[in-house]
Structures are given as structure tokens and as C-alpha cells.
């Protein structure tokens, strides 16, 4: 029988290529100019080429989401820039595991001001406060008030001479006319991998160094970014990628940036109770302590199975020593950095208002219990992720077919309050969890195709998930010998990105 390729004689789109519809057109751009204010407050004029809403799979389910934008700087402050071998910032804008489209993006910064940190977060999430705002104007006057603006990371990346790729991806709420949810797990990660494959398959056509792809994302987007980093070239996605006609290329990425990753979902309920279990909710109520304690016990069991070593010589991380680990490794250094940067009078004011902190010899110290009191209200109810009434976004993320939401933990299924007769998880759930959890690729089955460089950030007041989640991610990657740069932003909430300039410099360092 003839192969598909043999039967399409003479239709090769460009020399040496069989990419067909997935061939990037180097000429199909518009030229835009924007102003980027760097972290020192200096303005830069950046002229760049902008390719919009390119479908990245041959058999799209929904092109509105399965498409990407490319921005390539050509001139910075009047000087020509050659980005043909530059690092590629692959910045997703997924928030809340929701659908993410770049179809309406303008490529122009500023505007409606999407959350920072290489991507979006769902509305209602805390806005970052300390990062300098990019101010941008569009010399062409071609603005689109509906948004789609480049984030701080993306603008700074362009000004640094990097290529920026913005992939869209399907998300959990998408439903077709038959009532089927087609953006639930694992759609988003499959789409992001397909987008990476598109870029790599077009090596030499898409400007930039396809061996230096650096992923970025925040919250659910941070979870997907870390999953993209951990799961590079894993064979378990092959059938899904084939189904949507992904390019035949590697989907491994070089480095991973993840801000407040909402990941390790099937263990997040226990981790959350271990961390925030005794904190009252914003309504002033303490959650059901019986459920909270059962979940805390699950965290202890889980953490023991991980057998992760803490960074910098800290021993094996357990539910008993994790408070000490967080305080010493992350929280006190975070407070110290914050306080050291204040003027003497501002520091004195802060310390007077926060007497739980001891400031001595230029270092902050405090107890875990006092830190928890300082953070105050927990954001979520119990269980936070696999709710007994199937009411969370994560329950929807694990929906299937015409079922909008499902349980993804045995505990959630057992305690279901929606009238389910099945007391066992659906049989496809374990595989979906492997497809969605970076820890699977770092701990259960260490993946050699993973990213070896990790930039992980989290606000100390972020109670969207447990503070252990990103620390475990960092410890798992470091345990495999990877280069891990992880710190917590003092007093910052969900979605914070207060050191975007450092991230841009880190990219230069690790890709150089
Ligand atoms: C996000 C926030 C959450 O609290 C969550 O459970 C999932 C995603 C987000 O901001 O993307």
C-alpha cells in the first residue's frame, strides 16, 4: 500500500520538509514597535516581528485554542538585533486550568495588563504588587483594547533579544455540541507539547534556538509549565499527540519557569491541610477538623513515600520536619531579603507591626506557628481540590465525556456527597494523574528528557495551595541533579512575580 507521503508527490512545501500545513511562514508577520520599561525604570524602544494565531497541529479540535503567536525582536533602542539563535521564551497564559486563546492577542504590551509571571491567572487572583509595571505604547496605533497584551516577562524577554512564543491551549470548560468536555485533562498539556513540537519542527524557519526553549507559566499555567519541563519526550503522551496531528519532533524543553504551580493535584488536599489546616477561612470559620486531620495523615504518608532530600544538606523531608525546612530554607531567607531591602525607618515600622519576627545581625527569624498566624485566612475549604461535592475547578479538570466533574482521589470518591453510587475512582483516573503530574516524571519514573534547569517562585501568603508543593517539586528536581533556583516572595499572594528581571538574566545564564 502507498504511504501517505508517497501519494502526496510534488507537494513538498519547502526544501527538505514534510511538515505540510505545519510549515511556519517566515514572511507572514507584522512589524510592531513597543516601549518596554526595564526593572531599573529605563525605557527601551523594541521593534519586533509578530506572527499571530498560527495553528500548531494538523488535526485541530479547536483552532481558537490550538494556535500560537511568535514575537521576534529586530531592533532594540535603534540597534539591529539578530534573534535567529536567541533563547525562546515559551510563555503560556493558562489560568485556572481554563481555556487559553492567543487568537485575540495584539502583541502589544501594557493594555489590560495581564498578570505577570509569564502568563495569566484567572480573574480574582491577587495582582502582583512589587514588579515594575511595563509601560508600552504602540507606534503603529494598532491597539486592541480587548487585551491579549504581552506580560512583563514577555516584554523584558523581547527587550533582551529573546524570541517569545505564546501558545494557546484547550481548557476544562470547553464543551462541544454533543455536550462533551474536550478541554479536560490531559488536553492542555498535550496542546502545549504539540506547540513545542511545532516550534522545533520548524527549526531554522521560526527564529530562535529551538534547543533553548524556556517555558513559563503561573498557577495552573505554572503547573503546566513544570509538567512540560518534567515530561519532555515522555512516551505516555504519544497517542494523544498523534490524535491531534502534532508535528513529529521532540517536545523536550531546556529550562522551566514556574510561578506558584498548582500541581501534584492528587496529593494537594493532604498537603493543604498539613500547611493551612488550622488557619480559619476568610469567613472566620475553622474547617472540619476531622476531615482536615485525616487529610494531614495522608500528607505524612505521601511525603514519606517521596523520600526527598531537602536542599542544602537538609535531610529527608517528612511531615514532621517540613515546617522547620520551610522556615529555615525559604521563609526566613525570604523575610530577610525583604527587610534588608527596606530603609531603616521602613524596616523599623514593619518590625513594629510584626513583632513575631526577630531581627538580629541582619537576619529575620520566627516560628512556623507565628508565620501561619501572620498569613491569616486560608483561601480554600476542605478538601481544597477534590471537593466532596465536586465543586472545584480541579473536579472539572478531571471531567470526561459529558461528565463535567469527577473525583480524582480515593478519599474524595469515598466521601462523595453528590449521590454517586460508584465508591471507586473511574478506571482511567490513575493514567490521567500520571499525565498531569510532574512528580510522576521526577520521582516515580525519573525522565531523562526533562528540563535540567528550574526557576520556581511562590508568594509566602499564597494559600491557593500548600507551600510544600513547589518545595517538593524543587527538591525532586534537585535530587536528580538538576539546577534549581527556587525562592519565596515575602508577603506576596497568588500570582506574584517580583523579580522578572532576575528571571531574564537567569535565562541568559543557563542558556549561554
Ligand atoms: C489556579 C488557582 C487555584 O486556586 C487553583 O486551584 C487552580 C488554578 C490559577 O490561578 O490558575
Image (cartoon, grey):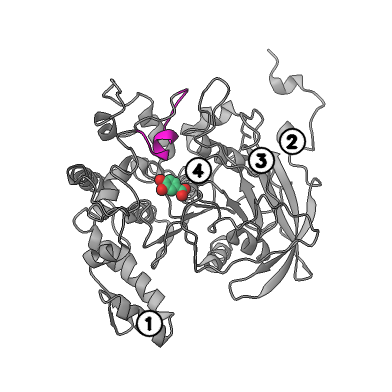
Can residue 313 be seen?
Answer: no
* Residue in the image at 45% along x and 26% along y: 400
**Rendered-image quadrant of the C terminus:** bottom right
* Magenta region, main secondary structure: loop
Query: Alpha-carbon distance for marks 4 and 3?
Result: 15 Å
The residue under label 3 is 201
C-alpha separation, residue under disc 1 versus residue under disc 4: 44 Å
State the residue in front, 305 or 362.
362
- Is residue 286 depicted above or below 408 in this figure? below
User: Residue, x 37% and y 36% (percent of image)?
Assistant: 391
Query: Which one is earlier in the sequence, the residue at label 1 or at label 3?
Result: 3
Cβ of disc 1 within 8 Å of ligand 1?
no
In space, the residues marked 4 and 2 are separated at their CA atoms by 23 Å
Judged by depth in the image, the label closer to the viewer, 1 or 4, is 1
**Residue 483 colored magenta?**
no
Label 4 sits on residue: 232
User: SS class of the residue under badge 3?
Assistant: helix
Q: Separation of disc 1 and disc 2 at Cα?
A: 61 Å
Which residue lies most toward the top here? 1
Amino acid at each position: 500500500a502507498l504511504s501517505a507521503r508517497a501519494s502526496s508527490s510534488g507537494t513538498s512545501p519547502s526544501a527538505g520538509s514534510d511538515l505540510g500545513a505545519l510549515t511556519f511562514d517566515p514572511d507572514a508577520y507584522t512589524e510592531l514597535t513597543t516601549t518596554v520599561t526595564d526593572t531599573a525604570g529605563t525605557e527601551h524602544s523594541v521593534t519586533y516581528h509578530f506572527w499571530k494565531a498560527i495553528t500548531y497541529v494538523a488535526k485541530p479540535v479547536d483552532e481558537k485554542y490550538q494556535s500560537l503567536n511568535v514575537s521576534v525582536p529586530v531592533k532594540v533602542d535603534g540597534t539591529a538585533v539578530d534573534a535567529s539563535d536567541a533563547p525562546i521564551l515559551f510563555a503560556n497564559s493558562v489560568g485556572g486550568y481554563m481555556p487559553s486563546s492567543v487568537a485575540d492577542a495584539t502583541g502589544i504590551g501594557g493594555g489590560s495588563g495581564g498578570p505577570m509571571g509569564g502568563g495569566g491567572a484567572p480573574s480574582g487572583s491577587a495582582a502582583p504588587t512589587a514588579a515594575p509595571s511595563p509601560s508600552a505604547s504602540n507606534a503603529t496605533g494598532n491597539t486592541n483594547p480587548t487585551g491579549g497584551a504581552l506580560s512583563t516577562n514577555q516584554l523584558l524577554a523581547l527587550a533582551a533579544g529573546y524570541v517569545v512564543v505564546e501558545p494557546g491551549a484547550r481548557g476544562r470548560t470547553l464543551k462541544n455540541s454533543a455536550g462533551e468536555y474536550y478541554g479536560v485533562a490531559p488536553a492542555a498539556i498535550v496542546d502545549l507539547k504539540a506547540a513545542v513540537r511545532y516550534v522545533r519542527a520548524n527549526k531554522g524557519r521560526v527564529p530562535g534556538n529551538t534547543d533553548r526553549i524556556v517555558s513559563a507559566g503561573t498557577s495552573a499555567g505554572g503547573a503546566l509549565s513544570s509538567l512540560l519541563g518534567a515530561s519532555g519526550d515522555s512516551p505516555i503522551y504519544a497517542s494523544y499527540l498523534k490524535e491531534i496531528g502534532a508535528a513529529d519532533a521532540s517536545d523536550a524543553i531546556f529550562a522551566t519557569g514556574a510561578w506558584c504551580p498548582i500541581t501534584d493535584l492528587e496529593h494537594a488536599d493532604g498537603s493543604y491541610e498539613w500547611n493551612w489546616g488550622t488557619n480559619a477561612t476568610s469567613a472566620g470559620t475553622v474547617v472540619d477538623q476531622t476531615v482536615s486531620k485525616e487529610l494531614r495523615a495522608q500528607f505524612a504518608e505521601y511525603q514519606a513515600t517521596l523520600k526527598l532530600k531537602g536542599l542544602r544538606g537538609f535531610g529527608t523531608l517528612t511531615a514532621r520536619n517540613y515546617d522547620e525546612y520551610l522556615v529555615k530554607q525559604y521563609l526566613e531567607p525570604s523575610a530577610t531579603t525583604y527587610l534588608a531591602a527596606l530603609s531603616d525607618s521602613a524596616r523599623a515600622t514593619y518590625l513594629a507591626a510584626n513583632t513575631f519576627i526577630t531581627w538580629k545581625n541582619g537576619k529575620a527569624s520566627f516560628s512556623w506557628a507565628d508565620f501561619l498566624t501572620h498569613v491569616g485566612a486560608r483561601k480554600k475549604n476542605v478538601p481544597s481540590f477534590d471537593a466532596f461535592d465536586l465543586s472545584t475547578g480541579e473536579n472539572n479538570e478531571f471531567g470526561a465525556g459529558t461528565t463535567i466533574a469527577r473525583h480524582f482521589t480515593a478519599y474524595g470518591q469515598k466521601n462523595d456527597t453528590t449521590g454517586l453510587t460508584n465508591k471507586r475512582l473511574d478506571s482511567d483516573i490513575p493514567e490521567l494523574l500520571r499525565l498531569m503530574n510532574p512528580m510522576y516524571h521526577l520521582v516515580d519514573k525519573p525522565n531523562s528528557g526533562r528540563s535540567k534547569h528550574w526557576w520556581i517562585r511562590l508568594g509566602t501568603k499564597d494559600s491557593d495551595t500548600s507551600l510544600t508543593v513547589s518545595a517538593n517539586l524543587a527538591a525532586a528536581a534537585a535530587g536528580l541533579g538538576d539546577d534549581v533556583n527556587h525562592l519565596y516572595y515575602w508577603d506576596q499572594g497568588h500570582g506574584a512575580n517580583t523579580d522578572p528581571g532576575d528571571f531574564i538574566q537567569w535565562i541568559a545564564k543557563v542558556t549561554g
